[in-house]
Image (cartoon, rainbow, N blue to C red):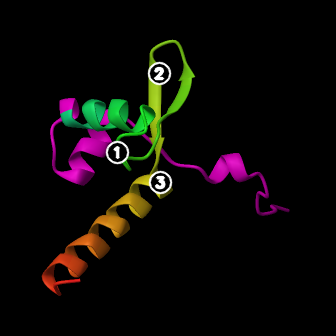
């Protein structure tokens, strides 16, 4: 008998900088620049998850929310709001 997992960690999808860059259609360097600005409080870019050492990832849901927010900004600009 199988049961659905209730472990929230099992449902988290983590992305590499290259994955994020592809999703945003920017360079990997731009991802790191925006990440640094966000950690300094100077940008709204999602903060990364540090997994130790040199391993850094971003949550898929955070990137999706960021993209949704960008879509809202574009809509406001087009409507003159």
- Asked if the residue at tag 2 contacts the one at tag 1, i.e. Cβ–Cβ closer than 8 Å, the answer is no
- Is 57 left or right of 25, judged from the image as shown? right
Disc 1 to disc 3, C-alpha distance: 14 Å
Asked if 13 appears above or below 55 in the picture, the reply is below
Q: Earlier in the sequence, mark 3 or mark 2?
A: 2
At x 47%, y 40%, the residue is 47
How dense is the environment of label 2, judged by Cα within 10 Å: few (below 14), some, or many (20 and up)?
A: few
Quarter that holds the C terminus: bottom left
In the orientation shown, which residue stands out farthest toward the right?
A: 1
Query: Residue 11 or 1: which is nearer the viewer?
Result: 11
Q: Earlier in the sequence, mark 1 or mark 3?
A: 1
Residue topped by disc 1: 43
Residue topped by disc 3: 62
Asked if the magenta segment contains residue 58, the reply would be no
Residue topped by disc 2: 55
At x 36%, y 67%, the residue is 69
Asked if 74 appears above or below 81 in the picture, the reply is above
Quarter that holds the N terminus: bottom right
SS at badge 3: helix
Residue 51: give x, y in percent of width and height.
56, 25
Nearer the camera: disc 1 or disc 2: 1
- Which region shows up in magenta? 1-29
SS at badge 1: loop
Residue 74: give x, y in percent of width and height.
20, 73
Disc 1 to disc 2, C-alpha distance: 22 Å
How dense is the environment of label 1, judged by Cα within 10 Å: few (below 14), some, or many (20 and up)?
A: some
Number of numbered discs visible in the structure rendering: 3
At x 27%, y 71%, the residue is 73
Nearer the camera: disc 3 or disc 2: 3
Disc 3 to disc 2, C-alpha distance: 18 Å
Residue 64: give x, y in percent of width and height.
40, 61
């Amino acid at each position: 008998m199988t049961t659905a997992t209730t472990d929230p960690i099992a449902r988290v999808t983590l992305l590499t900088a290259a994955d994020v860059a592809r999703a945003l259609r920017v360079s990997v360097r731009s991802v790191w620049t925006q990440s640094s600005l966000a950690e300094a409080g100077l940008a709204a870019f999602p903060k990364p998850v540090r997994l130790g050492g040199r391993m850094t990832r971003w949550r898929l849901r955070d990137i999706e929310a960021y993209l949704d927010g960008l879509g809202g900004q574009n809509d406001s600009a087009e409507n003159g709001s």
